[in-house]
Image: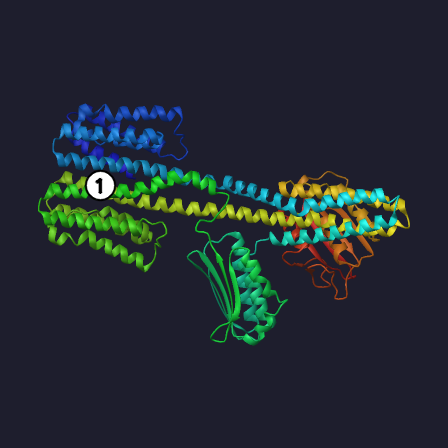
């Protein structure tokens, strides 16, 4: 609308003053050509500015802007504004600004040569500078918004790649050495079996201990890489406390936090509320999370002091929090305050700029973003200079000039310090009050200045469009334009001046609105891409935790189990012990391969290989196993998910259940494939030791999967392929895990 309005004003100025119809057609076609190139090419975010087409069009714009000047004189003097915006947009910085200066100089020369009035020349030159900058900024801002929008996927992928490198380092430090130690000890036991059974048993015991320790490490790392939701924990806490008849107030205002800080606060909140429910005779509890400058504070306050003092004794869970919080650079205190209430307080530092993998990209964008943010106040300052020159054209009385200059300076100061800030809240009482102040600065000088009144109403109407809701903003816009036109008419302005200044006010208002809105959108998208990158990291951490648990859990459990079995068989059947030892070495090599696959993101598993491993492991645990498999080909993602379900289901059997028999069946069902693992290891409370609970007697129709469990991980994996995972105790007392995956 701004670019088109500029062209319409040019046509309206040109046609009535043309000498003959031929010149009128010539001028109109030239303006249409300039508008078409600007709107259909330079303003298109997808147009490639470094292409031959762009260079050819730049030459065409230069010809259309300068060749008609001898024929039209002052009537065509503003058309090089298109050239000024185009050179800033297309050329590298070291060439763009000198070329821009040359364009401005040619415009000033044109006005000086064809007009001769110094004030008119200055006014018109600054007006041309204004429109050159506007054309550039509107086109560049739209491109930056488009580039940011398209960069989301790339930034998220880079965030994930960098996070994988960190995972690989963690895995190498934590698991690589342990698995290598197991493999080394396995080879040593193989050599000692024929020489000294006692020494072989000693090494086997050490290997078993290493496997068990490594399994514990895997579970710890898997748990540590899970991100907890602060919002979800606060809702859960509020619900639990209310259900316990505790009056609870929750205030959550944490702002944007790094993943580690969010997870730590969620953990502290969970532990604090658990303490309230477990230890305290509490009637009131206040939970407050707020961000203060460069830190975020969590406070849990309750009136159960006496009981809470016991919670701080050595061994309680709250005593471990200070060390964990300190690892993130924060502090944690738990004590009774002066009012006799128990207060758990945690403070964590918050970096002013969230560190992340997109920092390099932000640094690359910084010069251009900084240029745009500097050019916006410069453009508005040019509007102020234009108003100053305009009042000098109307009057030379010092007090009137001083009043106009003073109000313009005040308007610009208000604009720069408040409305131009992307963080300024739009729909607030303070902002509406500032808008009223802006209106007063614009219209109150009308009373003493009368017909010599000059101001910058474009600032008001453009800012109002941004601040007010659309149903109020556009009528306010139209009202102010009408009032401005009436004031100019009452001041005795000619029809030409009335049309020119009213159209200029409309375009400057739209320009201010466009610049403010695009800079806000740019800031919002910049924040959004940071958040998207963080979300990608969080998803990768969760994926890593699931893979680590699912892929390595059974391997390490099986290594520990087979190490114990080999130790028992060593004195009875050395050949059987040698076979078991060979399988241990195979499992160790598989675990090392799984470590690499977790770190790299490559997670394709062989269902046939997993079936053979499962059969061997269950037999080693003295579990009778009956297995029914499918021979047909299935899609790779389906095979991988079924392999993971099989691995985790058997790991669950080995870890939690006193099992004597286990049945595993893979069958074709309508539209998919089902995998069932059924075992008889149900404990005394009617459930296996898993974290899966299902009411007895309802078969596998319903299940409740607790977050963080291995079975819970599987439900996410199966759901990702559109399948369903159910688990529960059957009427016959057996526990059934069933996954159905579309194929």
| Residue 670 in view, yes or no | no
In this image, 82 relative to 271: left or right? left
The residue drawn where x is 18% and y is 23% is: 70
Expressed as whole percent of the image width and height from the top left, the position of residue 189 reads 82, 45
Q: Nearer the viewer, residue 141 or 326?
A: 326
Disc 1 on helix, strand or loop?
helix
Quick one: quadrant of the N terminus?
Answer: top left
Residue 308 position (above or below residue 400): below
Q: Nearer the viewer, residue 610 or 159?
A: 159
Expressed as whole percent of the image width and height from the top left, the position of residue 72 reads 18, 26
Q: Which residue is mark 1?
A: 504
Q: Nearer the viewer, residue 527 or 450?
A: 527
The quarter holding residue 374 reads: top left
In this image, 128 relative to 147: left or right? left
Expressed as whole percent of the image width and height from the top left, the position of residue 77 reads 20, 30
Of all residues, the one furthest to the right in this rendering is: 572
For disc 1, the neighbor class at 10 Å (few under 14, some 14 to 19, many from 20) is some
The residue drawn where x is 24% and y is 28% is: 28
In this image, 153 relative to 70: left or right? right
């Amino acid at each position: 609308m701004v670019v088109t309005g500029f062209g319409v004003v040019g046509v309206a100025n040109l046609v009535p003053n043309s000498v003959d119809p031929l010149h009128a057609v010539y001028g109109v076609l030239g303006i249409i050509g300039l508008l078409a190139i600007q709107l259909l090419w330079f303003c298109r975010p997808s147009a490639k500015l470094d292409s031959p087409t762009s260079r050819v069009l730049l030459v065409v714009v230069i010809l259309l802007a300068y060749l008609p000047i001898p024929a039209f004189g002052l009537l065509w003097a503003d058309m090089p504004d298109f050239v000024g915006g185009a050179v800033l947009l297309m050329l590298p910085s070291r060439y763009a600004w000198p070329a821009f200066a040359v364009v401005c100089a040619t415009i000033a020369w044109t006005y000086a040569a064809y007009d001769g009035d110094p004030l008119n020349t200055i006014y018109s030159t600054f007006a041309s500078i204004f429109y050159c900058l506007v054309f550039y900024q509107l086109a560049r801002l739209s491109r930056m918004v488009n580039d940011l929008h398209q960069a989301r996927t790339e930034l998220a992928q880079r965030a994930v790649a960098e996070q994988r490198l960190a995972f690989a380092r963690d895995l190498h430090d934590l698991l690589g050495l342990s698995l290598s130690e197991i493999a080394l000890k396995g080879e040593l036991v193989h050599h000692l079996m024929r020489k000294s059974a006692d020494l072989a048993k000693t090494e086997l015991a050490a290997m078993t201990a290493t496997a068990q320790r490594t399994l514990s490490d895997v579970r710890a790392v898997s748990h540590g890489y899970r991100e907890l939701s602060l919002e979800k924990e606060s809702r859960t806490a509020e619900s639990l406390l209310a259900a316990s008849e505790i009056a609870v107030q929750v205030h959550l205002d944490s702002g944007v936090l790094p993943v580690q800080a969010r997870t730590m606060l969620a953990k502290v909140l969970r532990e604090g509320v658990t303490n309230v429910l477990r230890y305290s005779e509490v009637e009131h509890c206040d939970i407050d999370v707020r961000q203060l400058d460069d830190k975020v504070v969590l406070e849990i306050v309750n009136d159960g002091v006496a009981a809470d003092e016991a919670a701080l004794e050595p061994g309680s869970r709250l005593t471990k929090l200070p060390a964990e919080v300190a690892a993130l650079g924060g502090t944690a205190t738990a004590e009774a305050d002066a009012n006799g209430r128990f207060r758990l307080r945690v403070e964590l530092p918050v970096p002013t700029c969230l560190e992340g993998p997109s920092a390099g990209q932000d640094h690359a964008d910084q010069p251009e973003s900084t240029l745009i943010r500097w050019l916006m106040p410069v453009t508005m300052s040019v509007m102020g200079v234009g108003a100053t020159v305009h009042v000098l054209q109307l009057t030379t009385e010092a007090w009137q000039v001083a009043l106009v200059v003073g109000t313009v300076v005040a308007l610009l100061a208000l604009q720069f310090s408040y409305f131009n800030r992307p963080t300024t809240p739009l729909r607030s009482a303070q902002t509406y009050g500032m808008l009223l102040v802006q209106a007063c600065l614009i219209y109150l000088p009308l009373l003493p200045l009368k017909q010599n009144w000059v101001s910058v109403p474009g600032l008001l109407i453009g800012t109002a469009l941004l601040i007010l809701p659309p149903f109020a903003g556009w009528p306010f816009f139209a009202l102010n334009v009408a009032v401005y036109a009436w004031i100019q008419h009452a001041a005795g302005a000619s029809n030409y001046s009335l049309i020119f200044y009213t159209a200029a006010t409309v375009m400057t208002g739209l320009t201010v609105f466009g610049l403010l809105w695009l800079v806000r959108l740019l800031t919002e998208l910049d924040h959004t891409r940071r958040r998207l990158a963080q979300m990608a990291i969080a998803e990768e951490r969760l994926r890593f935790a699931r893979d680590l648990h699912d892929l390595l859990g059974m391997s390490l459990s099986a290594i520990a189990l087979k190490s114990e079995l080999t130790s028992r068989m060593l004195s009875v059947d050395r050949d059987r012990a040698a076979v078991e030892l060979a399988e241990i070495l195979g499992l160790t090599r598989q675990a090392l391969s799984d470590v690499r696959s977790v770190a790299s993101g490559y997670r394709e598993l062989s269902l046939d290989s997993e079936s053979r491993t499962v059969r061997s492991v269950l037999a080693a645990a003295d579990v009778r196993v009956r297995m029914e498999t499918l021979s047909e080909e299935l899609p790779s993602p389906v095979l991988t998910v079924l392999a993971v379900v099989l691995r985790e289901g058997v790991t669950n059997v080995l870890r939690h259940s006193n099992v004597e028999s286990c049945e595993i069946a893979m069958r074709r069902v309508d539209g998919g494939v089902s995998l069932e693992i059924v075992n008889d290891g149900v404990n005394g409370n009617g459930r296996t030791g898993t974290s899966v609970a299902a009411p007895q007697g309802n078969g596998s129709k319903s299940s409740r999967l607790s977050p963080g469990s291995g079975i819970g991980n599987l439900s996410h994996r199966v759901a990702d392929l559109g399948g369903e995972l159910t688990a529960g105790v059957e009427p016959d007392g057996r526990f059934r895990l069933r996954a159905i995956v579309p194929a």
